[in-house]
Image (spheres, rainbow, N blue to C red):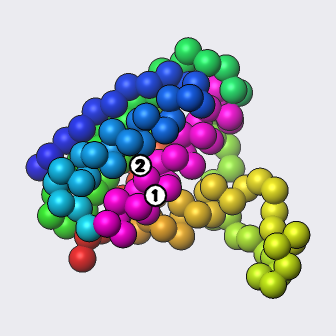
Amino acid sequence: MNELKISLTSDYSEVTPACRKLKAFFIELGVPEYVEINMEICVNEALNNIIKHAYLGKPDNLIEIQATYNKSEIKIKLIDTGICRTNFERPELYYNASDINSLPESGMGLYIIDKLMDNTDYKIEGNKNIFTLTKKIS
């Protein structure tokens, strides 16, 4: 099993460099491009949500990323010590696909993550929030 750990602070400017490190890890391992793209999109969305909602946009708080890869799946754990998530409903979006103005202005991140990942899990251990994204590789 291959693993990668990344630590960053809750600063929006650190999201892209962290995602680039993950992308390089996936490319080096020969992960299919569609999987790598899906993971990058979802990690980007999840990190932005952690910064905005768990840390209320305040910088200098720790976020850890733990990625594991084997031939059948990728798991990424995003770990923070911010405010715990309270809404566990699966997001649904209602909009008119032919009217771009009907798209919601927020709330799309969790919807995208839910649609692109094969499984997501959120749990609280002690003072840590752990959001796990799993993508199967076929």
Q: Does the magenta stretch include residue 2?
A: no
- Residue depicted at 41% across the width and 68% down the height: 118
Quarter occupied by the C terminus? bottom left
Residue projecting furthest to the bottom: 98
- Residue 103 in percent (x, y) is at 81, 68
> Residue at 57% of width from left, 49% of height from top?
45
Q: Mark 1 points at which residue?
A: 120
Magenta range: 33-55
Residue 105 falls in which quadrant of the image? Answer: bottom right
Q: Check disc 1: other Cα within 10 Å, few if <14, some if 14-19, many if 20+.
A: some
Query: Is 39 displayed left or right of 16 in the figure?
Result: left
x, y percent for residue 65: 37, 36
The label on residue 132 is 2
At 62% from the left edge and 41% from the top edge, which residue is drawn?
A: 49
Q: In this view, does 108 lie above or below 64?
A: below
Which amino acid, by three-letter code, is at mark 1?
Thr
In the rendered image, the residue lying farthest to the left is 1
**Circle number at residue 98:** none
**Regarding mark 2 in the picture, which secondary structure is present there?**
strand
Residue 62: x and y in percent read: 48, 21
